[in-house]
Image (spheres, rainbow, N blue to C red):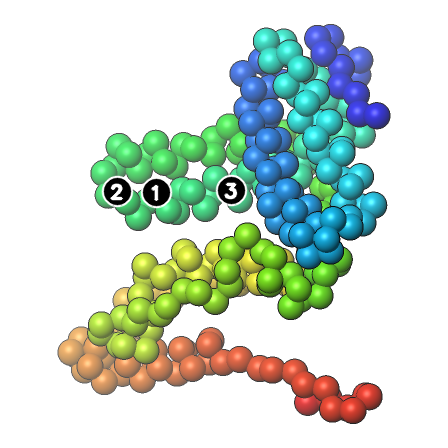
Amino acid sequence: MLSLTIGEAREESMPVFDPEQRRRLHRYSSDHRMWFQDWLLNPVSKALLGILPSRLSNLYAEIQEFEDLLGGNLGEAITVEERHLPLLKRVLLYQKLHQAEKQEELRYKSANQEIRKKIDALTESVDQMMAQEWFINARELSMPSITEFLTLQAAYEVLPVAIGSISSKYDEKFRILQSQADFLPRLHECRIESWLRGTDISVAFIDIDDFKTFNTKYTESIVDGGLLPQLMQTLESHVYAHGWAYRFGGDEYI
């Protein structure tokens, strides 16, 4: 049974959240629960005709009860006990990622500096909580991947979004480079793919002006027309190279 101490803190080291922060945490917890439902609980249940592993059932019960307790009396301050900090840390990490993705989407919609500042401020509340000592010292509650319960093919069939449905648009200048408008949708897909496979994503940024400064021997027109297309094609062919794995017989692989 989960428990939270409302009002006076029983231990000084435990984090205390005022009513406004508590309301935010309740909303964050609800967002995290919906993610858990959409990406783990419901897909696994759908694929296995209602069969659920105990780990998923127990995690969902813990998440649901934690959300209910946070929302019990939103007008009072709340102290979260130490044993609940891993789940709270997980909720905040999810919210940080969720809000960062929303920020990127909104930045594409407006170049107004006042609006941009308000967009950048969307994560301030989460950032402040994540800067506290309890957050830094707490361990994060581990969340399973859907592929712990389903095969990769079965997972693709029940995910709430279709993977690989984005059609490529290529840059008008170099033609082999994908349009910047495709970056966020593709990054979202990559995050899903990395979650399914238990791997990380790296995003690299290259400022072409640095390249032009280094190559002072050539004029800008030669750099743009001759050197950069070759450089970009080399980068593109390297970055977007793929490999496939096949099994032949019992223990032979390519």
- Relative height, residue 239 to residue 4 (above, below): below
Q: Residue at x 46, y 59 (%)?
A: 187
Q: Which three-letter amino acid code belongs to the residue tagged 2?
A: Ser
Quadrant where the C terminus is found in the figure? bottom right
Identify the secondary structure beneath mark 3.
helix
Q: Which residue is mark 2?
A: 110
Q: At 62% from the left edge and 49% from the top edge, which residue is drawn?
A: 39
Which residue is most to the front?
49
The relative height of residue 57 versus residue 174 in the rendered view (above or below) is above
| Amino acid at circle 1 | Leu
Q: Decide: marks 2, 1 in contact (CB < 8 A)? A: yes
Which residue is labeled 1 in the image? 106
The residue lying toward the viewer, choosing from 53 and 134, is: 53
Circle 3: residue type: His
- Calculate the distance from the C-alpha at mark 3 to the C-alpha at mark 1: 13 Å
Q: CA distance from mark 3 to mark 2?
A: 19 Å
Q: Is residue 14 visible?
A: no
Relative to 153, residue 148 above or below: above
Residue 201 drawn at (x, y percent) = 55, 62
Does 174 sit left or right of 197 as displayed?
left
Quadrant location of the N terminus in the rendered image: top right
On the image, which quarter does residue 230 sit in? Answer: bottom left
Q: Secondary structure at mark 2?
A: loop
For residue 179, say whether it is visible: yes
| Mark 3 or 2, nearer chain start | 3
Q: Could you tell me how far apart the alpha carbons at marks 2 and 1 are, in whole angstroms?
A: 7 Å
Q: Residue 22: x and y, percent?
A: 60, 19
Point out residue 28 in the picture as x, y percentages from the top left corner. Answer: 57, 31
| Residue labelled with disc 3 | 98
Q: Secondary structure at mark 1?
A: helix
Q: Is residue 241 left or right of residue 225?
A: right
